[in-house]
Image (spheres, rainbow, N blue to C red):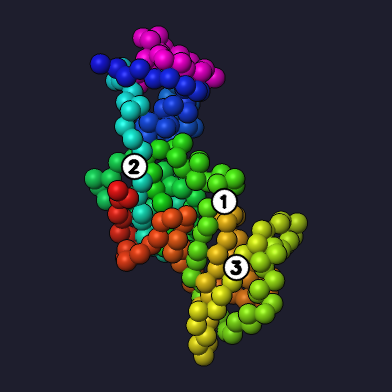
Amino acid sequence: MAKKISGERIAKIIAAAGVCSRRDAEKMILAGRVKVDGVVITSPALNITAQTITIDDAPLNATTPPRLFRYYKPLGLVTTHKDEQGRKTVFESLPADMPRVVSIGRLDLNSEGLLLLTTSGELARKFELPSSNYERVYRVRIYGRADLKPLQTLKDGIEIDGMRYSGIKVEVEKQGATNAWLRMTLHEGKNREIRRVLAAFGLEVNRLIRIKYGDYELGKLLPGEVAEVK
């Protein structure tokens, strides 16, 4: 029996059920694959209230609770479902028995560490909202020596090429002969934020590992490993 569904824009409901992204849901609707109360709809601009949704005549299961996974993203993978340059993606590298998931935020090609994955597009968006203010913690290795005093000014934020970055906490974990390890805590996670901010101080990043996102930690996961959050 098809599930009764209440609430919101139809593409959002389909995405929240873990079927696909909201954009892909809109494509399904435009292709005539979605019915509401047995009638094909052709526009994603439709709000649904206590109606029955089917996709390819199969009922949408909107009651399945969201699932959340911790994943150690290795170097060399892009955080996207499809890459125009043909590079290997995170989602192509997941175990075969994984459900369809979306990422909560991203890690770029040359970054590694904790990437949260979820079956719910709606949950992903809630994590990513600036108002959620989730803490992200990174271990960062840089070339040369780390002068902590100027880096501590980052707690007040910094503007680089017209882009404003909010406060970042910086600690020096270890100083070696040729490299230093920093621990950096931030709340925004803008594109290449750490690399750009450190470059403003003449520092070059040679390794970047995210070890925490909100309440969730990388822990003892090894590159490529995934563990479901119970």
Question: Which residue is label 2 attached to?
Answer: 67
Q: Position of residue 205 (x, y in %)?
A: 55, 73
Residue neighbourhood size for the residue with mark 3, other residues' Cα within 10 Å, grouped as few (<14), some (14–19), many (≥20): some
The one nearer the camera, 116 or 96, is 116
The residue type indicated by label 1 comes to: Asn
Number of numbered callouts drawn? 3
Q: Over which residues does the magenta segment extend?
A: 36-55
| 194 sits to left or right of 215 | right
- Can residue 76 be seen in this snapshot? no
In this view, 177 is above or below 228: below
Looking at the image, tell me whether mark 2 or mark 3 is earlier in sequence order.
2
Q: Position of residue 93 (x, y in %)?
A: 33, 53
1 or 2: mark nearer the eye:
1
Looking at the image, tell me whether mark 1 or mark 3 is earlier in sequence order.
1
Residue 104 falls within the magenta-colored stretch? no
Residue neighbourhood size for the residue with mark 1, other residues' Cα within 10 Å, grouped as few (<14), some (14–19), many (≥20): few
Residue drawn at 47 percent across, 55 percent down? 214
Looking at the image, tell me whether mark 1 or mark 2 is earlier in sequence order.
2
User: SS of the residue at dot 1?
Assistant: loop
Q: CA distance from mark 2 to mark 3?
A: 31 Å
Q: CA distance from mark 1 to mark 3?
A: 14 Å
Question: Which residue is label 1 attached to?
Answer: 133
Quadrant for the N terminus in the image: top left
The residue type indicated by label 2 comes to: Arg
Q: Position of residue 115 (x, y in %)?
A: 42, 55
User: SS of the residue at dot 3?
Assistant: strand
